[in-house]
Amino acid sequence: MSYLIKNYRQIIPVIVLLATLGGCAVTKDVQLPRPELPAAFRGETEKDTLGIAMLPWKSFFTDKVLQVMIDSTLKKNFDMQVALKNIESAHLLVRQSKWNNLPVVSLNATGNTSNPSNYSLNGMTASQFLGANHIEDYSLGASLTWEADVWGKIRHSNKAVLAAYLQSDEARKTLQTDLIVSVSKGYYNLLMLDQQRRVAVANMALNDSTLRITNVQYRMGQATYLAVQQAEAQRLAVAELIPQLEKEIILQENALHVLAGELPGIQQGRTMLEEIKFPEQLSTGVPIDMVRRRPDVRSRELDLVIANAKVGISKAQMYPALRITAAGGVGALKASDWFNIPGALFGTVGGTILQPLLQHKELSTQYKIAAIEREKTIVAFRKTVLGAVGEVSDAIIKIEKLKQQQYITTQRVHTLQQATANANTLFVNGMANYLEVITAQVNVLQSELDLASVRRQELSAMADLYRSLGGGVE
């Protein structure tokens, strides 16, 4: 026993010395380049250090019906549930990684008996010294295996696991933002379809009136049957539009329910399209702060952390690995002698340094590939940042131009509504023909449908701006 302790004392200083090398780094982490960002986004007129992305989504999307729909979707959407489960799995891996630096300890108990040939060395020895024709061996002990993290391989592995966990949360945030925007845009599309259906129904009544007047004029000999047919055709064209819009309404309602993890059904109590309001002035905030708030940009940053870790791991595999093994316990040829202490005690300790030789070329190639993948990660980061800036600028320009378009379209609607009223009055008094009335009705119908479409596009652009700035992240 004293001999084993003496040997342990000789080996332990060597182990401690090599273990302290665990702080040695065989590679240096590459840092993310500073993104090239403009002082302000293109098309931006107002700038605030906070910006709309800092607003909670309920403060941006203020419609109560829409808020209920978004809340329900965030809770019951199946993709969101999967994302939350992914976070749970990644968290378990992070907790497990904290044990990577600890040795592997195993308990074992063995017992065996053998019957050697009487004419073999073991048989004659057993017969001579044990007085038996078989040999028994019993042991009870523990073994320990530990690899010193000399070159930081375990440390890099832990970094990669932690980064993967953080990425799973960024993926959840990305999905959350996408769901908020998807529900809002679907809701705005539903309101547009409602408005277009109301327009079609109103124009249907107008066409009915024109058709009645044309029929009266035909019976009185003041109009031809062609006029009646033209008026009827225009009425049928508007009538055909109503079931088309009703179909689109039902499909959009179903899509919103399925997105929320619910069975298809009717969406009750929604508001009017013109009642949806947003602030007149929308601030995007400082570009560098707003872009880095986006979950996809942060995920690309974490990609570099993982890539750095993989480079460190692949480099460390090219260097010698120090493994310490130890075992101890009690053993005897007879079970009754197991606890005959200290005679039954046994112990071994050893250190092994493993240096790959023939695999060096393969490991070197893996290291070079990991370094290339790291460079690709930096390129992907630059691309994501540039795409984020482009999305913000696109949304700003869309909002600005759609506001102008909406103003012009509104003026066109008012003008055509007056023209239609005047055409109807002139038609009743025989001062305008049926073609002028039908043309006026067609134009006002199309302009009112266009106005609803432009308004929906503007609201969708608002939602896109909120998403592109990383809004809705919690």
Image: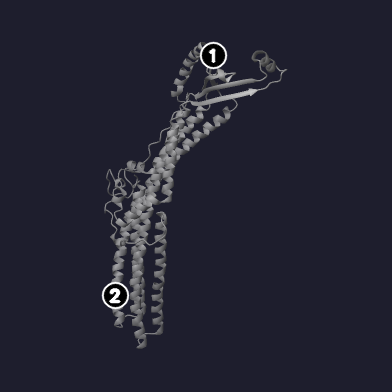
Q: Assign the C terminus to one quadrant of the image.
A: top left
For numbered disc 2, what is the local secondary structure? Answer: helix
Residue 40 in sight from this viewpoint: yes
Residue drawn at the location 51% of the way across and 30% of the way down: 314
Q: Earlier in the sequence, mark 2 or mark 1?
A: 1
Dot 1 falls on a residue whose secondary structure is loop
Q: Which residue is mark 1?
A: 343
Count neighbours of disc 2 (C-alpha within 10 A) and say few if under 14, some if 14 to 19, many if 20 or more.
Answer: some
Above/below status of 31 relative to 128:
below
Q: Nearer the viewer, mark 2 or mark 1?
A: 1
> Which one is nearer the viewer's eye here, 254 or 380?
254
Instruction: Residue at 60% x, 26% y: name it.
Output: 358
Q: Please state the horizontal and vertical placement of residue 418, each as a whole percent of the image.
A: 28, 72
The residue at which mark 2 appears reads as: 421
Residue at the bottom extreme, as displayed: 220
Q: Are marks 2 and 1 in contact (CB under 8 Å)?
A: no
In this picture, is 285 found above or below 150? Answer: below
Amino acid beneath label 2: Ala
Relative image position of residue 214 (x, y in whole percent): 35, 82
Q: Position of residue 409 (x, y in %)?
A: 32, 64
Q: CA distance from mark 2 to mark 1?
A: 115 Å
Residue 132 placement: quadrant:
top right
Residue under the image location 71 percent in, 18 percent down: 118
